[in-house]
Image (tube, rainbow, N blue to C red):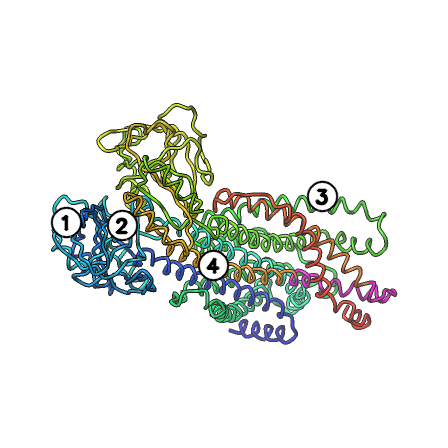
Amino acid sequence: MKRFKLALKLLKRDGRSGELTLLVLALVIAVASSTTISLFADRLQRTLTLQAAEFLAGDLVVSSPAPIEPNWLEQAAALALVTSRTTEFGSVLLENEQMLLASIKAVSAAYPLRGFLKTLEGDAADEAIQQQGPPPGEAWVENRVLSALHLKLGDSVTVGEKPLRLKKVLSYEPDKRGDFYSFSPRVMISQADLLATGVVQPGSRVQYFYQFTGAEQQLAAFKQWLKPQLNPSQRLMDVHDDRPELGSALKRAERYLGLSSIVVVLIAGVAIAMAAGRYTERHFNAAALLRCLGCRQAEIVRLYVYQFLLLGLLASAAGCLLGWLGQLGLFYLLQSLLPTQLANPGWLAVCFGFITGMAILLGFALPPLLRLHRVPALRVLRRELEPLPTKAWLIYGLAMLLMTLLIGRYSNDWPMTASVLGSGMLTLLVLTLLIMGLLRWLRGWLPRLSVGWRLGMQGILRNRGASIGQILAFSITLAAMSLSFSVRSDLIEQWRRQLPEQAPNHFALNIIPEQLAAFERDLQQAGILSSRFYPIVRGRLVAINDEAVQVRVSKESRGEAATQRDLSLTWTEMLPEDNAITAGEGWPSKQAGWVSVEQKLAENLKIAVGDRLLFTIGSAQVSAKVANIRSLQWDTMKPNFYMIFSPGTLDGFPATYLTSFYLPDGQKNLLNQLVKTYPAVTVLEVDQILKQFKLILSQLTQAINIVLYLALLAGFLVLFAAVHATLDGRIHEGAVMRTLGAKRAWLRKIHLIEFGILGAISGILAAVLAQTILYVLYKWVMHIAFEPSLLIWALLPVIGAFSVGLAGYWGVRQVVRLSPMRVLRRL
């Protein structure tokens, strides 16, 4: 206790004297920034996932070809989960001597748990939002059903053996699922009328969906309990896999938010290391005096460790509080863009900020503190005597390992964490060697420079070790800021390219070959630009290299979903322009018998180039050899396919055609004309999905901008910390030069030259570091096309020279203000 009380007294003394101001400020801002980003990213991610859950009509959905076990629903009720149920099947409707294959959906009273339905009661009526499905005795249908069967609202439609009154036109349902190419016109009825229809019989092809919603912990417990009990035909549905057009955007945003956390933590570590280094150097004399008074080396280190532990606890707690308030402020500023229902803050994110603060402080401050262990008592008499160096690299290594574990655990993205830190450390090692060579090269230019430039350059070359540390600190900071800005800009630009203002909002399916030319001509005459027309044959993948495909799938993979239903198979001579080949090549020959496989599906089913796939199409079987693996972008709202065949492979099978097109609101009446002219064609409207998707992307864009600003704010902190780390030596040098007649303006000029050169060098090296990390990150983690940025190479040296020069000029302004006599009396 005596040692602790002494440490407390020393801490209070240092606090009053201002010794701890920069260190505390660096730690508080670091913890506040990381906590704010952690809380903001965590809440935003869970909020957007919650909002995206509207596309499934629930937080958790179980899909099954048969009713699930009653004890599953009992377990859900025991966990206080709310449950709804839908049943989907196809049925032929016969009315007014017209026939239509429709998709019937029977819904329970609680449906939808997430999202809402939209209906119309007349052609010119406004859409009404419905929180529940149709009551018993009613049917809500899509407008295409009315036009195809020559019906109007108020008429009856018979589903199986049950006549139902047509009361509303169904214009939107949140969970219209499946790929976009297997939709039939929708008829929605009540679950209470399902039995009376007599359609669902043993052997009928029916799909049951059970939606669940509730608290996150209860949902997680139910999911964990349910997973082991699923059979191969049942699966849990998730927005990332079952709505890939949303899932890929959410995944990229989550990775950016995780990347921002990594950037802020790294910047904070640099700031703490610089501030702790200066604090330690200013306490060499105090440590030597304690040695003279009889303190052992271990006791001295223990005293300062006590101080830093207490300092870390107080500063980390204050940073966490500021971080909590900061994320509340961010959500308040973005309230007009975010959903009304927000996820609650997670305590794990707060704990992450607190633990990160302690890890940063101890990890980066401990190596300088250990130098106090080696301070000799003789330093009291010989002020120039420096302590012996310690094995600081080992402590820094342990600190980086701990931070890597913390970042990886919280961001839950180990590949990105390893890519950023691994490529960054390797590049830093190379940059250190480059800096040493560059400084040696600059020394040869000293005789050719003017006096001002020579003195500015000598300030860099005089203490090469400190200059290398400063340049690395500035480089890491500028690279981290550039990294955040570049990824943010590329993400937003990619979303804009993939989802332009006139992105396709309608899909036309089941176009028969005889009507293809006429349908295409009618679209052109109406001024509607469509995408390519793809031929479609329905088939199922059954074997890979003579091995049943079920052997290779798991219940949680996309492969399981793709093998439990018919796929839309197409063929084309040229692959779609937004498909990129990742393995293999285009069609190796003009002969038939080749197939291209989507990358994620190939990974899940362990399909490689050269494998032979067997498909069942009707009663026939088709074999094809894998020519290539390709990646595609699900969020373009354009037709995408798991399997694309070479021309001639599917000849002889009956096919229909598919296309997508954009139709403005003012031309919606054209749809009825198309349906009447081509009654066999199914037109799918995805306006609501598209609007919701654009809203989510807008929210992500605003959130990413805020996170970028926080990362930039933390970055500027490092610049001032690095400047203050050398402040004492500059004060002494300035006093000597003032004594010899140097004017204040001349000293300011020297400082500007010195820090401008440091900033320019740091900017060049930061460009190398940022571009290297971006290449690794884009190619192996985020799967974004990497293009070297000439703008980064041109701007970073200028930005570095300006920002570091400004920070240095501001940070050392007191050097020229202090009286030389006052400074020299301290020596």
What distance separates the C-alpha of mark 2 from that of mark 1?
19 Å
Report the label total. 4
Between circles 3 and 1, the one closer to the viewer is 1
Residue at the image point whose x is 79% and y is 73% from the top: 822
Q: Specify whether 178 is left or right of 196.
A: right
Please say if the residues under marks 4 and 2 sit with CB atoms less than 8 Å apart.
no
Identify residue type, mark 2: Pro
**Which residues lie in the magenta part?**
720-746
Q: Nearer the viewer, residue 325 or 198?
A: 198
Please say if the residues under marks 3 and 2 sit with CB atoms less than 8 Å apart.
no
Q: Earlier in the sequence, mark 4 or mark 2?
A: 2
Task: State yes or no: residue 739 in magenta.
Answer: yes
Q: Earlier in the sequence, mark 4 or mark 3?
A: 3
Badge 4 marks a residue whose secondary structure is helix
Q: Specify whether 71 is left or right of 19.
A: left
Identify residue type, mark 1: Val
Residue at the image point whose x is 14% and y is 49% from the top: 199
Q: Earlier in the sequence, mark 2 or mark 1?
A: 2
Q: Earlier in the sequence, mark 4 or mark 1?
A: 1
Q: Earlier in the sequence, mark 3 or mark 2?
A: 2
Q: Which residue is mark 2?
A: 185
What distance separates the C-alpha of mark 4 from that of mark 2?
31 Å
Q: Which residue is mark 3?
A: 437
Q: Residues within 10 Å of mark 4 (few under 14, many from 20)?
A: some
Q: Which residue is mark 1?
A: 200
Q: Nearer the viewer, residue 547 or 660?
A: 660
Q: Relative to 282, is 162 above or below?
A: above
Where is residue 24 drawn, in percent x and y?
58, 68
Please say if the residues under marks 4 and 3 sit with CB atoms less than 8 Å apart.
no
Between circles 2 and 1, the one closer to the viewer is 2
Q: Which residue is mark 4?
A: 698
